[in-house]
Amino acid sequence: MKATGKAPGKGHVLALSGGVGGAKLAAGLAAILPPERLTIVVNTGDDFEHLGLTICPDIDSVIYALAGLNDRLRGWGLADESWQALGMLKTLGEADWFRLGDRDLATHIVRSWRLREGESLSRVTARLAAGLRLAHAVVPMSDTPLRTQVETAEGWMDFQRYFVAEQCRPAVRGIRFAGKAEMAPGFAEALARDDLAAVVICPSNPFLSVDPILAVGGVRDALAGLAIPKLAVSPLIGGKAIKGPLGKLLGELGAGMGNDAIATHYGRLLSHLVIDHADAEDAPDLRARGLGVTVTDTMMHNAADQQRLAHDVLAIAQIDSAG
Ligand code: FO1
């Protein structure tokens, strides 16, 4: 996006987020935008059924981060967590490879029981967010399952098996999203808003966390049809992912390296890429593609960093955060 010299607008922002990294920017945006001006759509490709419970890791990362309850060190789950139930599950001979904390279990119990009672995932997510006193809209990408699976030498594997049980060790040959999903109502409504002023792709893994959102029916076309700033914050710093398997995946999928690979992956969906100072040398080549590029500090250690980056993103899109 080129600067137009126009006064900053007061429009609505649609943020697309995966888990940990994305949740940090989502929390920054929520801290500086009033609830009526932000919709956060979250990846549900990582969701799975475990011990009879429906687990939605990225939704939980986002609502916990917005509520300031997330564990910053571990990167997922709740701070001040205890693990008594997990220990008892192990004693009883049940699976303990996916660690469910005592406090976190309450979230999974509420979600599972309300879904079983017939509520949609959107409704349950709104219920959980309200329970945590969140005022901003946190919306699952879809109310129907679309499950991320990775292809390894042993065949197709469910995401959490690959990510947690196998610690991302198997080489990935392909990624697919199993199922057929429609946009959740809150997602479709945000995309159709007259006052939609920017789409922000948070710094989540493009292949594993953002692609499932883009794979939901109608999303790519809807985004392509929007003549507004469409920004992504690169998940890379110094050419590397802060956490997770993105660097390894880029190599395994032959998707290129660094921010060039990120820009290639999103292609014409993006008008602007926000990169870190450590990757400033990538800017000329990215600009030569016709992308707007902003070099800033994208590392988010704390709430102040999250809000600073959120301010940067809104400034690029010429959106005013006040009121
Ligand atoms: N990630 C892990 O690496 N190990 C775990 O045992 C684990 C448990 C877990 C429980 C609840 C939850 O909401 C998330 C959890 N995660 C765990 C994180 C999660 O698997 C991934 O971070 C996301 O799916 C990737 O975005």
Image (cartoon, rainbow, N blue to C red):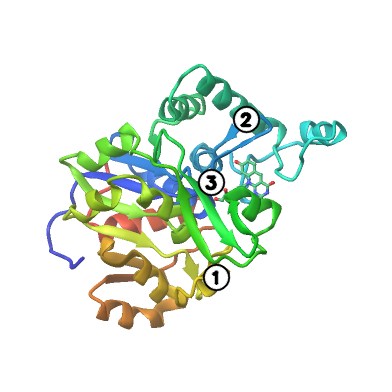
Tell me whether the residue at label 2 lies in contact with that at label 3, contact meaning CB atoms closer than 8 angstroms: no
Question: Disc 3 designates what residue?
Answer: 46
Q: Nearer the viewer, mark 3 or mark 1?
A: 3
The kind of secondary structure element at disc 3 is loop
Tell me the residue at 45%/73% (across/down): 255
Q: Quadrant of residue 5?
A: bottom left
**Label ID, residue 53:** 2
Query: Residue at 60% of width from left, 58% of height from top?
Result: 155
Q: Earlier in the sequence, mark 2 or mark 3?
A: 3
Look at the image and tell me whether residue 295 can be seen: no
Q: Nearer the viewer, mark 2 or mark 1?
A: 2
Q: Amino acid at mark 2?
A: Leu
Decide: few, some or many residues near mark 1? Use Cα within 10 Å; few <14, some 14-19, many ≥20: some
* C-alpha span from label 2 to label 3: 14 Å
Q: What is the x, y in percent for residue 254?
A: 48, 75
User: Where the N terminus falls, by quadrant?
Assistant: bottom left
**In x, y percent, where is residue 252?**
55, 72
Q: Residues within 10 Å of mark 2 (few under 14, many from 20)?
A: some
